[in-house]
Image (cartoon, rainbow, N blue to C red):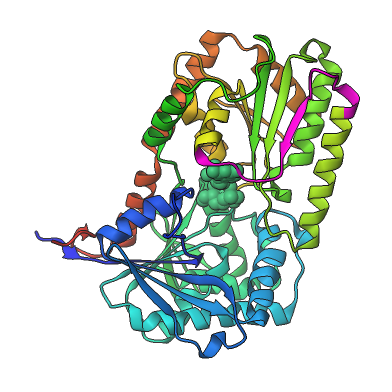
Amino acid sequence: MTAKPRRLVVVSNRVADFNAKFQTGGLAVALGDTLKASHGVWFGWSGDVTEDAVSTAPKVENVEGLTVATIDLTPEEAEGYYYGYANRCLWPALHYRLDLAKGNEAHSEIYFNVSARFADALMPLVGPDDLIWVHDYHLIPLAEELRGRGCTARIGFFLHTPFPSPEIFAAVPGQKRLGNALMVYDVVGFQTCSDRDNFRRYVAASLDGEQLRGDRIAAQGETTLASVFPIGIDATAFRKLAESESAKGPLLPDLGEDMKTIIGVDRLDYTKGLPERLRAFETLLEDFPEHRGRVRLVQVAPPTRETLPVYQEIREEVERLVGRINGRFGDLRWTPVTYLHRGVPQDILTRLYRESAVGLVTPLRDGMNLVAKEYVAAQAPQDPGVLVLSRFAGAAEQLREALLINPHDINEMARALDRALTMPRQERWARHNRLWQRIETYDLDTWRDSFIQTFAASDSDPVNLFPK
Ligand code: GDG
């Protein structure tokens, strides 16, 4: 049986920057290569804000066979859709922070209208045999808008964030419209079983839906497939990079053989549990004085969404805690916390992971958390470090051999840090081995391919994204 040639069309809030000297985002690499090979399309917001955005045609460029199409947003759209409903209402609510979720009807109207604008611009670029893959919470209404314009292509959606418990989602302003819009997709993909189950329960409770066979659910006259596709990393490439980088010698200043490093890498977002992490490190130094002068925390925290006040507040809190710990415990030789409020290049990051005895990942909620996987992949297999991981990161469903902690329990975290810093090599090795196997098996290619195959599953033909 010959496979029907298919083209992949990826839609996300922003498109990858293909003019950048090197790609840092894993998604850009994984999807970029597939898109180039299938002569696909990547569509999204250019990142530019212009007064006449609505009347301007999309910018279309060709990058090695891939069509990159972008539109600008007006200042009102950027404010209402991106900074407003998406990041001030949906992002906190999806991470269980209803206290921070600011409902604003004007913003949610603009959010829905931006999906309509995306659909207008996308329609001339897509055909009936395309697979349209929409990413993340910014664009939930897109399938509904495309269908309303007569689009018959298959449309799938992947949520990179958690899907919260139904009681939380039911409290999101505009939730019914969102829930109904999700049901229009042919496939709705989640990071974890718990996210999928939350969605199922929400559909049953709030949309009078029902579960059909397997992952298929029905509500409001629509049926969709709600399935789990845990996102991964390019584990082999990461391990290779870490090996070649570590051959360059140590990156961190040599403070003697006894000095161990704990590494944290996170956008400076309130979901990542940074204050809790710093308090746990402080408690470690308080309750386990034997570690004083023998451990340092290196925290890389690049800025994100800085114009929103809640992000300015979290930055101030983090900086206050770093100053307090360093002032309280540091001496002329030893600075307990090294804090970088900026991004570092990929090669440096990989070396930092490799040189650190502990990877500390403490989100209060996280869709998956790729840093956890990258830390594991970067370890020297014979003498690996220990991953300390929040139970509330999606990654905890897969990475069960990490030291799993509750980031709200500062003392438990401090004890886990002590255990990680003193863990015998045999146990480190055994845990790492299992973690590595899972990361290598469920890598980025597996994620992409399993989504794409499921997505086209109702076709009798196998999918062929690479026509001759
Ligand atoms: C969302 C979801 C989900 C960070 N700092 C630097 C740097 N990074 C890279 C990391 C990692 C990526 O950014 C962050 O990914 P995470 O998964 O940890 O978190 P989010 O940004 O919140 O991502 C999340 C993800 O989407 C994918 O579905 O896992 O739950 O929230 O790759 O390495 N990279 C470099 N320098 C830095 O300073 N080079």
Q: Quadrant of the C terminus?
A: bottom left
Q: In percent of the image, x 47 and y 81: which residue is there?
A: 145
The percent position of residue 284, horizontal first and vertical second, equals 79, 21
Is 371 placed above or below 104 here?
Answer: above
Is 305 placed above or below 256 here?
Answer: below
Q: Per the image, is 342 magenta?
A: yes
78, 3: nearer the viewer: 78
Which quarter of the picture shows residue 215? Answer: bottom left
Q: Could you tell whether 396 is left or right of 64 in the image?
A: right
102, 47: nearer the viewer: 47
Q: How many marks?
A: 0
The percent position of residue 65, horizontal first and vertical second, equals 27, 65
Q: Could you tell whether 315 is left or right of 258 in the image?
A: right
Q: Which residues are magenta?
A: 327-346
Q: In percent of the image, x 79 and y 49: which residue is there?
A: 315
Q: Per the image, is 315 magenta?
A: no
